[in-house]
Amino acid sequence: MKKICFLVLLATSLFTFANKPVYDIYPKQEPIRRSISVDGNRISIYSKNVQQLRHIVFAADTHLAISDERENDFKQYSARMADAYRITKHFRTGKEMTTRQAFLETINHSKKSNADLLVLCGDIINFPSEAAVEWCRQKLDSAQVNYSYTAGNHDWHYEGMSGSSIDLRDKWISERLMPLYPKSADPLMYYIDVKDVRVLMIDNSVYEILPRQLAFLQEQIKTGKPLLICMHIPLYAEGRSVGYGCGNPNWNANTDPGYKTERRLPWPEKGHSKTTYKFREEILNAKNVLAVFCGHIHAETVDMIGNTPQFVTQMNGTGAYYDIYIYPEM
Ligand SMILES: [Fe+2]
């Protein structure tokens, strides 16, 4: 009798299973973002995991060249960049402007629009002069805007100085750039919570990712919180240039276009470390990444890498920025 009951139960289950629509049998994981809309430099992200509207201004590549007499001993390392991007053209009006005007306009916009956070995502300054760091701090402090900062490949770079990129980054971050980071933050990786949205600031300005940065990312993915990932250098996207250099299989000493001009060591012969590839893979496989935001390319681009959107901003030296609005799903 027991055997008959079991067989009836099994047959009923199989029948039910076979007739169920696929979406009932394999329920989809609820996506962290339901849709994204782009209107000019305004990006709207809709997410069920966000309770209240959030507004983040994202800027990178201001390329400020500011120095004073304290730079005299470093002129042999900063001469080229001290002259770079002196005059730019405004991203909207096309009128000539300075990078200082662009930076102030962006701060002003963040302030006036009551943004929750202004993200400064690298290459804000052309080389690590004390005067540039002080000028930025003073302008940000007097405007009283909430901001976060991570370095780009120029902020800490003195051209022609000997040493590896990783060592020179450590040296100049600790000796010059520290006033730009939040107190007690690890400059290579930290987060800022904008209510329920977690903004990750990850320094990939040497194109490579360190093991402890990978561990940090993995930890953040595990939290399940909606993540906005901000880093200077974009992730590799198919068909893009080698500038999309984080986890790029074409990135190596033979493809390095700038080491002679920038007077630095060429990229490694063998290309990226396994850690860097893994870092990219982890971002692309994560279910709680709202989007990735980067600079470095100096052009506005959008890529859908697998299911992950990546936005690259036009250079802030032209006044450009992204207005990111994160909406609770309506
Ligand atoms: Fe740049």
Image (spheres, rainbow, N blue to C red):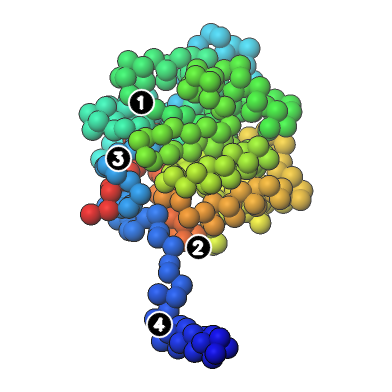
- Label 3 and label 2: CA atoms lie apart by 25 Å
- Residue 202 placement, left or right of 144: right
- Label 4 and label 3: CA atoms lie apart by 40 Å
Q: Which residue appears at 29% of the width and 44% of the height?
A: 51
- Label 2 and label 1: CA atoms lie apart by 32 Å
> Which circle, 1 or 4, is nearer the viewer?
4
The numbered mark, 3 or 2, whose residue comes first in the sequence reads 3
Mark 4: amino acid: Lys
Secondary structure state at the residue bearing disc 3: strand
Q: Which residue is mark 1?
A: 146
Ligand 1 is within 8 Å of the C-beta of the residue at disc 3: no
Q: Camera-side residue: 304 or 90?
A: 304
Q: Can residue 223 be seen from the camera position used here?
A: yes
The quarter of the picture where the C terminus appears is bottom left
The percent position of residue 276, horizontal first and vertical second, equals: 65, 47
The percent position of residue 261, horizontal first and vertical second, equals: 63, 37
Q: Which residue is mark 3?
A: 54
Q: Quadrant of residue 157?
A: top right
Residue found farthest to the top: 69
Mark 2: amino acid: Gly
Q: Which residue is mark 2?
A: 306
The numbered mark, 1 or 3, whose residue comes first in the sequence reads 3
Secondary structure state at the residue bearing disc 4: loop
- Label 2 and label 4: CA atoms lie apart by 29 Å
Q: Camera-side residue: 51 or 265?
A: 51
Q: Can residue 302 be seen from the camera position used here?
A: no
Mark 3: amino acid: Arg
